[in-house]
Amino acid sequence: MKLTVWTYEGPPHVGAMRVATGMTGLHYVLHAPQGDTYADLLFTMIERRGHRPPVTYTTFQARDLGSDTAGLFKAACQDAVDRFQPEAIIVGASCTAELIQDDPGGLAETMGLGIPVIALELPSYQRKENFGADETFYQIVKALAKPMEKTERITCNILGPTALGFRHRDDIQEITNLLFELGIGVNVTAPMTASPTDIANMGRAHFNVLLYPETGEQAARHCEKAFGQPYTKVVPIGTGATHDFIAEIRALSGSMAKIDTDRLRQTWWSRSVDSTYLTGKRVFIFGDGTHVKAAARIARDEMGFEVAGIGCYNREMARDVRAIAKDYGLTALITDDYLEVERAIEELQPEMILGTQMERHIGKRLGIPCAVISAPVHVQDFPARYSPQMGFEGANVIFDTWIHPLVMGLEEHLLHMFRDDFEFNDEAGASHHGGHAPKPAQTKIEIAPVAVEAAQGGNVIWLASAEKELKKIPFFVRGKARRNTETYAVEKGLGEISLDTLYEAKAHYAR
Amino acid sequence: MTHQMTPPPALGCRTAPVLKQRGQREVFCGLTGIIWLHRKIQDAFFLVVGSRTCAHLLQSAAGVMIFAEPRFGTAILEETDLAGLNDAHTELDRTVAQLLERRPDIRQLFLVGSCPSEVIKLDLNRAAERLTQLYAPKVRVLDYSGSGIETTFTQGEDACLAAMVPVLPETQERELLVVGALPDVVEDQMLALLAGLGIGPVRVLPARTIDREMGVGPNTVFALTQPFLGDTHAALVRRGATFIAAPFPFGEEGTTAWLAAIAAEFGVSDATFTQVTEAPRRRARQAIAQAAAPLNSKSVFFFPDSQLEIPLARFLTRECGMTALEVGSPYIHDALHGPDLDLLPAGPQISEGQDVDLQLDRCRAARPDLTVCGLGLANPLEAEGLSTKWAIELVFTPVHFYEQAGDLASLFARPLRRKSILGAATGLREAAE
């Protein structure tokens, strides 16, 4: 038993739904109790989809348990096939149905439905959403795709995008265009946009582009083995990665076509004089492994940030993220416990978080700006505008997204210079963000010394004058200043922090 | 009593045939009630004993994550718990100890059963008794089921309140007990109205904290503010309390009828009743008249969701000029819903339970001006050109009693106002794909 407040990933059958909902002509018959239909709203509300996910829930109740839940499953399965006339169905159980062991796959196969029936075994009490999507896509490909003659011109499949994916909709378009510029056609994009017939034709491509290892790697490996299709290892998020991706595609395809990089503004934007205020900003990165790996590279090599902490919530990616962390001189935080992430952020006091919607809330609580780089998704992650993460346009989008939460250039200096301005101060937040009306100035100044439990166990006391001075430091660096000063005091064996200690520490940590 | 009420229709819906179908139900399970109950009862923590799905539902159903340290969580069952490698009760005790250590402010702990915990027959009642002995008097531990195999959406609140009834102390006092979780502001308005009528003492279940809990006994009379409290009703009757049947307090008419039923029980004079209700009734009528203009002569179709459907259909037809085509409810209890069904003019198809695909067929054929449905259906129907009202908003918004009557009408009117302002989009279906 594990006590959980918020989760980064849903159960594995939600992953299967992401695959089914992204596809066309496929239906998912899910053995599940009433209430599991909540998952429909993820797609209709968060993603604003205009049709219901292609999922039929058997909706068993307590009174059915002693009698014939298997019969209920078969009836629901037959109704779904009759009503929706899919080209193929996937069948499986949600967490509760897994316990009653009706074997939906076996039942459906005996029904003579006349269409392919793909049975899913998704262990709800061990695995999670990304595994569910990856496994479902793999089973579909394994069942439907057969070796075929390759297309005459060089083509590839794009693997991994699903419904409810973080910017998958726009990434597909960006990468399809990029491949087009390289003279490579896309045979099938799957699971999102593909029908079972399309899946059957996957073997015609010369190689595969794996955009999302979380949801497409098993299928990519299968295709490599079964159809001799190599797959790409670079995920083209960020300028450097996009260049590497192009090189990888050239090696796989022999394409020599030139790429027009006129649209790529990110490289100049981060080299323009305004962006010196980004240099050395300490960022904490957390999300799914793929996006975290990409973000780490962009943060350090393309924005000039200092990566202060890094981690991911999907254990499947732990090895990769640990390797990157080592390269950055850090220890990776691999956890799906958001309280643990919150503690890490509180401890590190970064100047910015690159995280998920969960970290955005953590940041809100701790007063640290946050840009969202990864699922779990929120309605805000489905903007009306074209907003990819991948390719050159993706690099532009990421630049804009990441700097938006920050207090910019000269504004930062002005906040330093005139800290007590009644309407332009800490409490007001960055001026380009709404909803931060200045609160009335506080007349009461706390002067009680504050005891701090220092990391090494000793007690450090903040003297009133130092505490007051600390309050004058702008909010976006105050946490770091407090922590640095305390660390400094402990290192020097000081029992209390005076005004001098504060400035000694500042000089000590100056960069 | 005569309070210038609109007369009931010649033929109501109480005896109308009910269409009962069985199939896929597009509804939440009872766990969803935790979303509002954990804010309403301020010293309570709701610990769901369930799966990752339960945890995911709670954070998805809320639509927004309440990151201000929610007073709910999920003890997620793992492989080892199911394989019998761990003793589930020992694990639960450990989890509760961990929780109470982190939240020393908790005075009431609800162990909430889920589909998986019920299928593996984890006896939470026994666990609650054991933990109560362990943590009494500081923490009281109760259990109820919010599982999808037992409960539909708002029945979770019913199960929670019903679990509290047996542990309320015995009293011989003649007291009015008002049952149902209301937004604090609405509850205060209600208490002010009852105080104005000279009715007291008035107790409210659920109380905001355990210290404000009431007794119950043979002289207790109780009224319900929510139409989904069937089990709580039965539990209170078992304790000897007397139920005041009335239409539910939605709209001017519903509120007046509800208050009138209580006033009659407590012998409040007509003069007092008129004096207390006259001004708010006038305000409510005015507000409804303003807000409901877009609803007049329009048709409405209810998918089953919260059991609020019948009282709301009564409000929309009798106070807002709408015509009901179908009124679907997950469950219909005559004792609770009868007074509203009496007032609802005959005509609409009354349905209980759901086969969602068949009901969608009926809805598409009927082409109602407004469809009241859950979040899973709303955008798909909008994309087909049907205006919808998300049913869940009716549970999450202050809509009861006089001062909210105009707001209630506005909730239904807004989708129609939007449609008239924006017009029909061309290529809407494509954009929504």
Image (spheres, coloured by chain):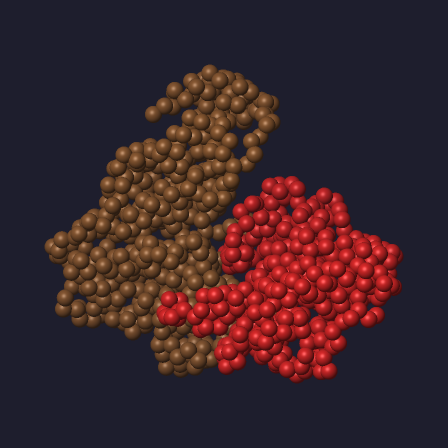
Chain colours: A brown, B red
The one nearer the camera, B87 or A501, is: A501
Q: Position of residue B40 (x, y in %)?
A: 66, 52
Give me the residue at 34% from left, 39% from top.
A325
Give me the residue at 24% from left, 63% from top.
A157
Residue A125 falls left or right of residue B284: left
Give me the residue at 60% from left, 27% from top.
A444
The one nearer the camera, B49 or B121, is: B49
Counting the numbered discs, the total is 0
On-image quarter of the C terminus of chain B: bottom left
On-image quarter of the N terminus of chain B: bottom right
Instruction: Tell me where residue A174 sits by quadrant.
Output: bottom left
The one nearer the camera, B154 or B289, is: B289
Q: Position of residue A151 (x, y in %)?
A: 17, 69
Q: Position of residue B246 (x, y in %)?
A: 76, 69
Give me the residue at 18% from left, 55% from top.
A249
Residue B124 visible in image: no
Residue B223 falls left or right of residue A41: right
Q: Is residue A431 above or below residue A87?
A: above
Residue A398 visible in image: yes
